[in-house]
Amino acid sequence: METVSSEALASAAGVKSTQLRKDLTYFGQFGTRGLGYNVKALSGVLNEVLGTTSYQPVILVGVGNLGSALLRYKGFNKEGFEIAAAFDLAPTRERRTEGASVPVYPATKMSEFIGKHQVRMAIIAVPSEAAQSVVNDLVEAGVQAILNFSPTVLQVPDTVTVNNVDLALELENLSYFIR
């Protein structure tokens, strides 16, 4: 497909076409009235805006059951993110990571790796009692964005963004719709 209409994009996104057109104008004028958007140009602009024009190195901290599953997840690469390394207190422990080629290092090597590879994003999948300490180390090493799978509220400076993934809360949200 070479071009796509705002109606088709809006339908796929679940928004109104007028809102979609308005939102896209914040990034420039690249649609043609009556013809739609050139898919290649639109994709390029959106990738540039989202910072996904090149792989973003990400580290994973905590390689237990959840962390191992995240290492096996193939969706990160499709969206321009590469888990460059994982860190754990027990890096040599046996775990299910078949299909994942990400090295698991001792947690003590984390700060050095972050500096050497200019990592700015991290995923944490550690127990709640360890989460704040891990985040403190990440922030001190220069990480600016954290995806938190730990069931705890983290304290970070205003310059650091944290997105929390609370699986129990997500199930609770879904339960509302099955009454």
Image (tube, rainbow, N blue to C red):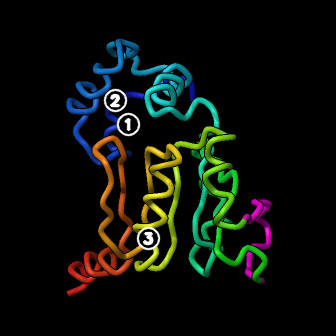
According to the picture, the residue beneath numbered tag 1 turns out to be 9
If the image is split into quadrants, where does the C terminus sit?
bottom left
Amino acid type for the residue under numbered disc 1: Leu
Q: Position of residue 101 (x, y in %)?
A: 80, 60
Name the residue rendered at 38%, 28% in the picture: 5
- Label 1 SS: helix
The residue positioned 25% from the left and 43% from the top of the image is 15
Q: Amino acid at mark 3?
A: Ala
Front residue of 106 and 58:
106
Q: Which quadrant holds residue 19? A: top left
Q: Amino acid at mark 2?
A: Ser
The residue tagged 2 is 6
Please give the range of residues in magenta: 94-105
Left or right of residue 150: residue 53: right
The residue carrying mark 3 is 131
> Which numbered disc, 3 or 1, marks the residue that appears first in the sequence?
1
Mark-to-mark CA distance, 2 and 1: 5 Å
- Quadrant in which the N terminus appears: top right
Report, in whole angstroms, how far the alpha carbon at label 3 lies from the one at label 1.
Answer: 39 Å
